Every structure is written in C-alpha cells, then in structure tokens.
Image (cartoon, rainbow, N blue to C red):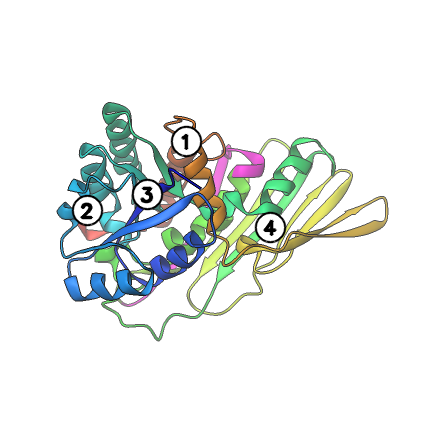
Amino acid sequence: MENKIRWGILGPGRIAHSFAKDLRLTQTSELVAVASRNLDRASDFAKEYDAKYAYGSYEELFNSTEVDVIYIATPHTQHSALAIAAMEHGKHVLCEKPMGVNTGEVTKMIAAAQRNKVFLMEALWSRFNPSIRKIKELVDLKKIGVISYLQADFAFYALDREEEGRLLNPALAGGSLLDIGIYPIFLAYLLLGKPSKIFASSKFHKTGAEIQTSIIFEYEKAQAMLYSGLTSNSEMKAKITGTKGSVYIHPRWHETNGFTIESNGEKEDILEPTVGKGYSYEIEEVNSCLASGKLQSSLWSHQNSLDLMEILDQVRKQTGITFPFES
C-alpha cells in the first residue's frame, strides 16, 4: 500500500514492544522512528522492529518530518506533557491510557489537539476489540433487553514488585485504579454511560499506593460492580445481564476472543479471534481517521476520554487516592 501512515514510538518499554509487533500486522502502517532518553535503548528497539530512525531525545522525534503520528507509551505521569509537546509540533497523537492522571490534564490535552488541529486519541485498546464492539452493538439493539447488572474485574498479584517501580509508587501515579481499574470502569461507561452515584472503597500499600478498589456504580435501572487489585489474581471474566438475557465475556475479558450470549434458555458462543495481541484494531482506527481527515475517533472520542477521567477522579476523591505531585 502506498502512503502508509508513518508512526513514531515514544518510550520503548514493554507495552511498546507489543504495540510494535501488532503495528507490523497492519497494511496501513509503517514504523519510522523510536525515541527514548537512552539512545542505546532506542537503537535496540529500532533495530528489532526495522525502524529507520532511533533518537536519544523526545525532541528529535517531535521535530521529525518523516513521522505523522506518535504513540506515547511512557508512564502515566508523563502522558500529558509529552502529548501536548508532540501536538505543539504538529504531530498526531495516540496516547496510552489513562490519557492523563486527572481531568485537568485531559482537558489541557484536548485543548492542545483542538488548538493545533491534530488528531488525539486515548489508546484504550479494549474499545476496538472485535468482541467488545459486537457486544456494544448487541446491547444498543436491546438484544438482552434493558441492562440491570454488570460485573467486571481486573486483578493480578504485584506486591512483589519494586516499590520504586511504576505500580507501587504514588509519585508515578501508581496503584491499581489508573493502571487496570480503568478497564472495568470503561466497560460500565461504554455500556451504561456515566453513573448517577458512585460508591467506592480502597486499600493501600505501605508506600501509599492504592492496591485494591471496589466500586458500585448506580444507574436508574442498573448497578455495576467493579473491582481492581494488585493483591491477588482474578479470573477476569465479565458479565452483563438484562431483562431478556445475559452476555458473558470470556477471560481475559479486556482482550477477549469471544463471548457467550444467553437468551430464552439457549446459549450461543460467539468467537472473534483477535489478530496478534489485539493492538492492531486501535492502530487501524487511528490510520482510518487520519486518512479521512478526522481529528478524533467516533468510537472513542475526546468526550469519552474526558468522561472516563471524570469518573476516575470521582472514585479517587471518594477513596482518598492522592498523588504527591498534585498537591
């Protein structure tokens, strides 16, 4: 394909490796450059994924005339500043979730995108998962009636991680909520919208990082029970029940390959095997938007990211989750 979308990756960490592998699976993308504050690290990454350029500073990537869009894969605390800097240089941006660490940051990022007339999207890859897209369509069509109950969790054991690392360090916006709690909250928001009331409770590590959060979302005709944690593993199933039936999302639900729909006493398994790890779907969405001149996705818009961040902020306020750099 001619005129491929030319990608740059900022922050060659673990998630960037998964992203780069899936970028290769698309027909509309080309990885051109990678940037790190460590040139050797950038060079190794560029060599592994056949990128033409390796930069030892982020500024060099921002100034590249051969890059159309930058994928930002740094820790949460750097998302806002780096995304804004990229957009001020005229670059389109796909920013790893959460887009910012609070509503103020996300608001500034959206304003920068609008000011510079560039594309901006939060890399909430589960939104583009084929099964979750189909479930959203089934729910919107009332195939299981009116939803009355949703349950979703995301948990794994991480208390053995380095306390200075990303997950257990409040200075890096660590904890379960922004890292993995965002997924169950996203699912409830996607299918039910913003809740009318939120009830939440958290437990904390000795570092001050939140390590368990349980949440109830209240809606006019439904409740959602959500959980994230770093203290143990969970099966990571999700279910949505309505007045006419139920949907069970196969584990691990946020990257699922299928679901089961139950209605009128009958069950049907619907399989939607993902390509690669599953990042190619959000990549193709970005490429499609750029090819058609869109500055935001209709599947995951600026308003969607802002709504999600506002919900996360409400949970944080209720549970006392704070970060030292915000005070």
Per the image, the residue denoted by label 2 is 61
Is 145 in front, or is 135? Answer: 135
User: What residue range appears in magenta?
Assistant: 190-206
Label 3 sits on residue: 6
Membership of 75 in magenta stretch: no
Most distant residue in the right direction: 265
Q: Residue at x 60, y 31 (%)?
A: 220
Kind of residue at disc 2: Leu
Question: x, y percentage for residue 142?
Answer: 71, 32
Which amino acid type is shown beneath numbered disc 1?
Ala
C-alpha separation, residue under disc 1 versus residue under disc 2: 21 Å
Image quadrant in which the N terminus is located: top left
Sequence-first disc among 2 and 3: 3
Q: What mark, if any, has residue 291 been given in the picture?
A: 1
Q: Is residue 54 above or below residue 194?
A: below
Label 2 close to label 3 by CB (< 8 Å): no
Q: Secondary structure at mark 2?
A: helix
What x and y, as percent, mark residue 141?
70, 31
Choose top left, top right, bottom left or bottom right for residue 251: bottom right
User: Which of marks 1 and 3 precedes in the sequence?
Assistant: 3
**SS of the residue under disc 4:** strand
The answer to whether mark 4 and mark 3 are in CB contact below 8 A is: no
Between discs 1 and 2, the one toward the N terminus? 2
